[in-house]
Image (cartoon, rainbow, N blue to C red):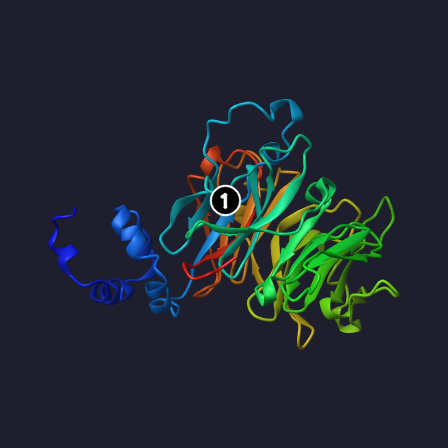
Amino acid sequence: MDDSPINRLPQDILHQIFSSLPLRQIMVCRSVSKLFNQMLTTPTFMDLITTQPPLRFLALRPPHHHHHHHHQRQNSHVSSVPYLHVFDPDQNQWLRFSLSFLPFRSPHPVASANGLIYLWGESPTSIESNRSLVVCNPLTRQFQVLPQLGSAWSRHGSVLVNSVNHRVMVLTELAALYFSNTNKTNSWLTFSANLPSKPRSPILISDSVFALCDVGSPWRSQWKLFTCILSRLNNNYNSWVCLERHEWGDIFDIIKRPRLVRGKGNKLLMIGGLKSNFSLNSSCSTILILRLDLERLEWEEAGRMPVEMYRSFQESSKLKVFGGGDRVCFSAKRVGKLALWDDCDGAVWRWIEGVPGGGDGLCRGFVFEASLTALP
């Protein structure tokens, strides 16, 4: 490799040549040799590709049993290398990024924003099960450990992130932790949640958090949409308000077990089974995707799963939904593959085959916009 004619070219010429390649090809070139990897990770080269658009992947979270391992296994040798498995919808292929550069046991990715992955990691030297929230870029193998949290937050809290000042929220039914690079104390701020029930599928859009809460009775669910503004978090009063309009009518009654997914721009998606009628144990005819414009506060139908595809999910008691923007994935036990709603160029429904691990269980995940220039 050292005798190759390409090595005789000045580095600035090589930088110009490689910077004209798409990000996918740059990633491939970095894996060719150590020389290429060093050349394509220098600050000078990074400056040249700052305008490269990120690659939009659908990342999988590890199964639950990988996350909650037992104390007696803490000294056992773990032979498998931890990976982040992602699906590239544009190339229709699965990829994986090694997480072995992280000095933690059982790294458990849970969220992503602005090209960075947020994950729970357990110190290999800790006797107790103390997990830290870590932010990293698996493409550049850089990471940062956020201030310490108790292990209960990793078991029960939902991690919400966005790209503004690395905002992070860990939300439970009773409390919320909030962290930002603008925090002068470099510590987590604690707020009372004051929600009527456990928040379901909370999401963070711009400066606001949205979550579904069941305000019904033990025998009949009644879902409502709640929201709070991060800049107005305060322990002196309830920051959460119920978002509802008379014009919405029975929008929450036609969907069974609704979930929220962040939409494109200032949009919110609500997804669930479309009830056949309003009876207590009504069956569903398909899966419905509704879109809420947060500026006009108007709902519209974004899509519904084709009936022939829905038959694969019809008998499953559990359904997992993940994604964001204009792509949403659906997973259920014993289906063996994922269903994808892709609205990038007009709504298209298709199957994703070859799910890592066999695809027999429930898959959870998030959108990962991969970038070589994202810094933890």
Residue 126 can be seen in this image:
yes
Q: Position of residue 21 (x, y in %)?
A: 27, 63
| Residue beneath the point at 69% across and 67% down | 208
Q: Position of residue 165 (x, y in %)?
A: 60, 66
* Location of residue 296 (image quadrant): bottom right
Residues packed near mark 1 inside 10 Å, few (<14), some (14 to 19) or many (20 plus): many
250 or 236, nearer to the observer: 236
* Location of residue 47 (image quadrant): bottom left
Q: Position of residue 153 (x, y in %)?
A: 72, 45
Q: Which residue is mark 1?
A: 338
| Residue beneath the point at 80% across and 53% down | 175
Q: Position of residue 158 (x, y in %)?
A: 68, 50
The amino acid beneath tag 1 is: Leu
Q: Is residue 223 left or right of residue 169?
A: right
183 lies above or below 197:
below
Q: Is residue 359 left or right of residue 316?
A: left
56 or 117, nearer to the observer: 117
179 lies above or below 101:
below
| Residue beneath the point at 68% across and 64% down | 183
**Residue with the most extreme bottom position:** 296
| Image label count | 1
331 or 147, nearer to the observer: 147
Residue 276 can be seen in this image:
no
308 or 323, nearer to the observer: 323
Tag 1 secondary structure? strand
218 lies above or below 177:
above
